[in-house]
């Protein structure tokens, strides 16, 4: 399965991903590597990643939530799975990461899934 997003959607995902990466108080290299690889899978060349990241930093968190809320079901499934997999990438699921995932999922009406379901979904993408 292949999935893509408009620039505003990418910025919103970047905003939420940055929050997830920082939620446990430490930024692991494998989290950043996973995020970069995911951007490339979404069709964003490595040289454009910095501009998406910078644009996401100026996006209010509430706007990111609003953008994700407006996505269709399949795109919401991707966002939920990506955040869940990003949370688990370092092998430890911090309570603050889990709370963030649950809150974003609730506020944005993301499909409910377990971490294993999130990882399985992410591995099914092209």
Image (spheres, rainbow, N blue to C red):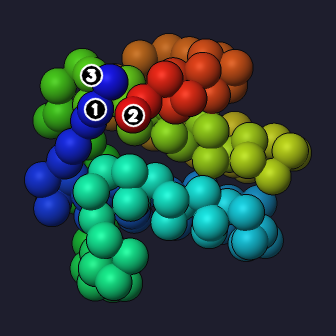
Q: Distance between the residues labelled 3 and 2?
A: 15 Å
Q: For mark 2, give the secondary structure.
A: loop
Q: For mark 3, give the secondary structure.
A: helix
Can you tell which mark lies on residue 74? 3
Residue at 56% in and 29% down: 123
> Mark 1 or mark 3: which is in front?
1
Query: From the image, which quarter does the N terminus lie in?
Result: top left
Relative to 54, 36 lies left or right:
right
Residue at 18% in and 33% down: 71
The mark nearer the N terminus, 2 or 1, is: 1
Q: Residue furthest right?
A: 92
Judge whether residue 96 can be spotted in this image. yes
Can you tell which mark lies on residue 2? 1
Residue 11 percent location from the top left of the image = 27, 64
Above or below, comparing residue 34 to residue 82 in the picture: below
Above or below, comparing residue 96 to residue 25 in the picture: above
Relative to 105, 93 lies left or right:
right
Residue at 81% in and 42% down: 93
Q: Distance between the residues labelled 1 and 3?
A: 11 Å
Q: Which residue lies furthest to the front in this view?
A: 126
The mark nearer the N terminus, 3 or 2, is: 3
Can you tell which mark lies on residue 126? 2
Residue 58 percent location from the top left of the image = 29, 81
Judge whether residue 106 can be spotted in this image. no
Cβ–Cβ under 8 Å for marks 2 and 1: yes
Q: For mark 1, give the secondary structure.
A: loop
Relative depth, front residue between 4 and 65: 4
Query: How dense is the environment of label 2, judged by Cα within 10 Å: few (below 14), some, or many (20 and up)?
Result: few
């Amino acid at each position: 399965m292949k999935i893509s997003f408009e620039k505003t959607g990418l910025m919103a995902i970047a905003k939420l991903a940055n929050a997830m990466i920082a939620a446990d108080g430490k930024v692991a290299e494998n989290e950043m590597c996973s995020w970069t690889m995911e951007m490339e899978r979404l069709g964003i060349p490595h040289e454009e990643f910095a501009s998406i990241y910078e644009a996401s930093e100026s996006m209010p968190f509430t706007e990111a939530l609003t953008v994700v809320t407006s996505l269709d079901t399949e795109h919401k499934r991707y966002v939920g799975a990506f955040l869940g997999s990003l949370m688990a990438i370092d092998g430890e699921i911090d309570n603050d990461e889990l709370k963030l995932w649950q809150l974003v999922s609730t506020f944005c009406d993301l499909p409910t899934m377990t971490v294993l379901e999130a990882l399985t979904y992410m591995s099914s993408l092209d």
